[in-house]
């Protein structure tokens, strides 16, 4: 049975842990708000980009001159998986769930006899993948730990890396993995194919006006200019969503931890009081029996 | 006929400006063009240059963009630029940094892209001169 002093120590240590988790939760809440605002602010550009590129893509689809980024290389043997996770832990199942989705994807592709190469953004995902997929994990890793505020330049850097390798013919299909932010308690791990570009077929139907649009210099030239930008935009959106998801996940994880610590403190306090009572009772019994013996 | 249209300037990170305008002058890929209300729909890529907007109240604002594209429809013009600055002397340094990067790229560019890269540099030089 632990002594009174031990119990006191444990209660104090759990109390300070609770203080830390509470503080982390509040920090995550503040960061989440900023991340959500950033994601919100980036939406107009991404949406317009998608409608324009989507409209153009439908216009040139099937034509001989369609750029490779849209039409693909004609094969789907070699896959590049870009796994985007957080730089830090203590955010519940956030990193694990993204990695899990990527792993399942990789296993399935391997099962189909395709070659898979994994590229990581964020340290946590890399650490996990090193254990599960050491053979497919490449050396290419983008470190965002020094980034205080995600900017478009960060996404541009990643996109240029990917596009450069596509131009070299290193892979046929690129898919990005990230968590879509649904709410503070729900983040959905998502796989999104960025190369070749994919667009919602049904969307924009009946939009007859679009076909009347003039393109300068030409449809193909505009598309060739826009597709790389569209890849960068998709990566940027994914990074922003990921940042919001990470903070959301951390916030609910820390909320749970704070609540658990509270419960633990209650239990320990109860035990402490019981032990104290027991000690007092024992002392009393000793005094009384001592008095009786006289 | 409406005499104003909507003008949006959007960067990947946020919407920079949004108001009603009478006309918008753009550095299009195939030369300067001016969008006015009821313009035929056009989508064009942009060269580095100045976007000059005449607002509904007659005020003229200019922005320096380093590339991107513009979507002109009958009732609005949207400029999607990766980088856009208010065209003033204060922001020259930012564009100059961009120019340096473009110059380096132009020198390293493979033969078939060299012309395009140099064209980009020339446009940027012109843009810096235009920014007052």
Image (tube, coloured by chain):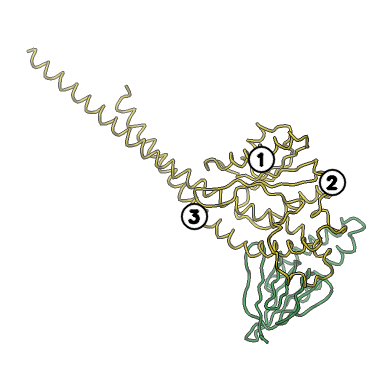
Chain colours: A yellow, B green
Give the mark nearer the N terminus: 3 vs 1. 3
**Marks 3,1: beta carbons within 8 A:** no
- Callout 2: chain: A
Residue A174: % across, % down:
74, 47
Q: Are marks 1 and 2 on the same chain?
A: yes
- x, y (%) of residue B69? 75, 68
Could you tell me residue A286's position as x and y percent?
A: 16, 18
The residue identified by callout 1 is A102
- Location of residue A47 with respect to B26 vertically, above or below: above
| Same chain? Circles 3 and 1 | yes
Say which quadrant the N terminus of chain B sits in. bottom right
Q: Is residue A119 left or right of residue A215?
A: left
Q: Which quarter of the image is occupied by the C terminus of chain B?
A: bottom right
Subunit of label 3: A
Q: Residue at x 73, y 52 (%)?
A: A159
Q: Secondary structure at mark 1?
A: helix
Q: Which mark is residue B86?
A: none
Q: Chain of mark 1?
A: A
CA neighbours of label 2 inside 10 A, class few (<14), some (14 to 19), many (20+):
few
Q: Are both tags, 2 and 3, on one chain?
A: yes
Instruction: Check disc 2 and report the residue beneath it.
Output: A169
Q: Is label 2 in contact with label 3 (beta carbons under 8 Å)?
A: no
Q: Residues within 10 Å of mark 3 (few under 14, many from 20)?
A: few
Indicate which disc residue A30 carries. 3
């Amino acid at each position: 049975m632990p002594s009174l002093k031990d119990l006191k120590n444990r209660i104090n240590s759990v109390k300070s842990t609770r203080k830390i988790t509470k503080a982390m939760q509040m920090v995550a809440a503040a960061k989440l708000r900023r991340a959500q605002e950033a994601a919100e602010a980036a939406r107009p550009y991404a949406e317009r980009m998608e409608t324009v590129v989507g409209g153009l893509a439908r216009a040139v689809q099937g034509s001989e001159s369609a750029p490779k980024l849209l039409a693909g290389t004609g094969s789907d043997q070699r896959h590049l998986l870009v796994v985007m996770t957080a730089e830090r832990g203590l955010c519940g199942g956030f990193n694990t769930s993204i990695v899990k989705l990527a792993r399942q994807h990789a296993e399935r592709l391997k099962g189909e006899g395709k070659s898979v190469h994994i590229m990581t953004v964020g340290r946590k995902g890399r650490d996990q993948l090193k254990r599960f997929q050491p053979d497919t994990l490449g050396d290419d890793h983008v470190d965002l730990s020094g980034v205080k505020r995600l900017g478009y330049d960060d996404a541009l850097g990643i996109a240029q890396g990917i596009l450069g390798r596509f131009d070299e013919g290193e892979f046929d299909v690129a898919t990005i993995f990230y968590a879509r932010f649904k709410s503070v308690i729900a983040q959905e791990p998502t796989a999104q194919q960025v190369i070749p570009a994919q667009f919602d077929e049904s969307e924009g139907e009946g939009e007859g006006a679009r076909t009347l649009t003039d393109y300068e210099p030409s449809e193909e030239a505009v598309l060739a200019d826009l597709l790389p930008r569209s890849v960068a935009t998709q990566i940027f959106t994914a990074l922003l969503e990921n940042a919001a998801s990470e903070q959301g996940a951390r916030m609910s994880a820390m909320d749970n931890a704070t609540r658990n610590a509270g419960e633990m403190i209650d239990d320990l306090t109860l035990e402490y009081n019981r032990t104290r009572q027991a000690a007092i009772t024992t002392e009393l019994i000793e005094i009384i029996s001592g008095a009786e013996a006289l | 006929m409406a005499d104003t249209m909507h003008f949006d300037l959007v960067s990947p990170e946020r919407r920079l400006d949004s108001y009603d305008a009478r006309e918008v002058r753009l550095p299009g890929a195939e030369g300067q063009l001016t969008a006015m209300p009821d313009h035929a729909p056009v989508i064009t890529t942009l060269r580095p240059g100045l976007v000059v907007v005449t607002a509904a109240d007659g005020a003229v604002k200019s922005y320096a963009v380093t590339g991107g594209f513009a979507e002109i429809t009958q009732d609005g013009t949207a400029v999607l630029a990766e980088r856009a600055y208010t065209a003033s002397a204060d922001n020259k340094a930012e564009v100059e940094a961009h120019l340096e990067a473009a110059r380096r790229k132009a020198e390293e560019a493979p033969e078939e892209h060299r012309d395009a890269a140099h064209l980009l540099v020339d446009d940027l030089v012109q843009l810096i001169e235009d920014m007052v």
